[in-house]
């Protein structure tokens, strides 16, 4: 049986970091070039202007609005992305049978199709943590979910967000939504292998995560599928736009 697919991103700009509709439009174009499977591209946002006609806009669901106000336990310098946990709710079944969550600030470098080969209800990515969080964590930039499964991840969180955040923190997981995901699923979910082609930049301390080196690349490795840009430097940052490979792919 063929399952419907949606690529989902969340866009908001609270002054912490600048994520704009045109950044979403670039992500949609990159996905369209690199995914042969029929799919919807959905942005969950409360902005309505500046999006391409190829981007489906979904207002932030009412049930996610309150947790959107939560702050990261990491402090004011770090983003809080708890609203993304809504994808685990029963409501999210309206999006598609399977949803892939993507950060807006990633670059798609090659075919995404192989990432859908894993048929488990949830598929996560485990970057090397270096000095950040536990080694068994799940990265928050990309994951794949069969909607209507693992709904307890959402239900337990919204029942008492403060308690959930405390549990994840006490267990040694860092971040906001990715800390809770890791607490709930890291030791029981399917994982894309380390060599699947998802890359992450190094920590500022120089301790590299996963295959590393995005900020130093002259050109992406042949096996690269996705380059994630957690942190301050983004594909649209002037220093990154100086790089030919970024201009080539991020468009």
Image (spheres, helix red, strand yellow):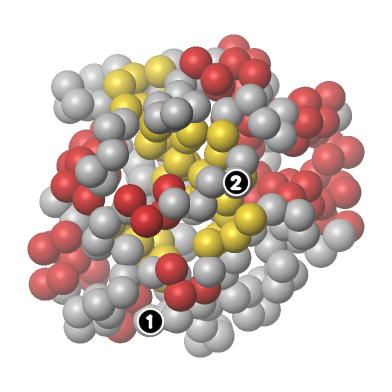
Task: Judge left or right: residue 244 versus residue 123.
Answer: left
Q: Which secondary structure lies at badge 2?
A: loop
Depth order, front residue of 1/11: 1
**Residue 151: % across, % down:** 72, 29
Report which quarter residue 238 is drawn in: bottom left
**Residue 127: % across, % down:** 56, 69
Quick one: label 1, few (<14), some, or many (20+) residues within 10 Å? Answer: some
Task: Judge left or right: residue 183 versus residue 68.
Answer: right
At horizontal 88% and vertical 57% (from top left) the residue drawn is: 170
Q: Which of the two discs, 2 and 1, labels the residue nearer the N terminus?
A: 2
The answer, for residue 26, to whether it is visible in the render is no
Quick one: label 2, few (<14), some, or many (20+) residues within 10 Å? Answer: few
Depth order, front residue of 170/78: 170
Question: Which label sits in the foreground, 2 or 1?
Answer: 2
Which residue in the rendered view is the most extreme toward the top?
Answer: 62
Q: Which secondary structure lies at badge 1?
A: loop
Q: Which disc, if any, is residue 213?
A: 1
The answer, for residue 135, to whether it is visible in the render is yes
At horizontal 83% and vertical 24% (from top left) the residue drawn is: 159
At horizontal 81% and vertical 64% (from top left) the residue drawn is: 172
Depth order, front residue of 40/23: 40
Residue placed under numbered mark 2 in the picture: 120
Q: Considering the image in quadrants, where does the N terminus appear? A: top left
Which residue in the rendered view is the most extreme toward the bottom?
Answer: 206
Task: Judge left or right: residue 247 versus residue 88.
Answer: left
């Amino acid at each position: 049986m063929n399952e419907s697919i949606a690529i989902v991103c969340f866009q908001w700009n609270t002054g912490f970091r600048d994520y704009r509709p045109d950044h979403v439009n670039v992500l949609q174009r990159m996905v369209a070039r690199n995914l042969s499977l029929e799919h919807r591209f959905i942005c969950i946002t409360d902005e309505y202007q500046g999006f391409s006609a190829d981007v489906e806009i979904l207002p932030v669901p009412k049930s996610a609005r309150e947790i959107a106000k939560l702050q990261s336990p990491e402090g004011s310098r770090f983003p809080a992305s708890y609203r993304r946990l809504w994808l685990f709710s029963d409501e999210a079944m309206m999006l598609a049978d399977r949803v892939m969550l993507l950060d807006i600030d990633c670059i798609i470098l090659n075919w995404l199709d192989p990432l859908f080969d894993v048929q488990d209800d949830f598929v996560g990515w485990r970057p090397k943590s270096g000095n950040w969080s536990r080694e068994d964590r799940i990265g928050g930039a990309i994951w794949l979910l069969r909607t209507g499964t693992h709904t307890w991840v959402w239900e337990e969180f919204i029942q008492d967000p403060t308690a959930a955040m405390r549990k994840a923190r006490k267990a040694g997981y860092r971040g906001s939504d990715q800390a809770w995901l890791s607490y709930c699923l890291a030791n029981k979910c399917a994982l894309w292998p380390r060599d699947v082609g998802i890359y992450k930049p190094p920590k500022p301390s120089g301790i590299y995560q996963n295959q590393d080196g995005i900020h130093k690349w002259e050109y992406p490795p042949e096996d690269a599928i996705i380059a994630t840009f957690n942190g301050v430097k983004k594909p649209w940052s002037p220093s990154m736009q100086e790089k030919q490979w970024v201009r080539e792919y991020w468009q």
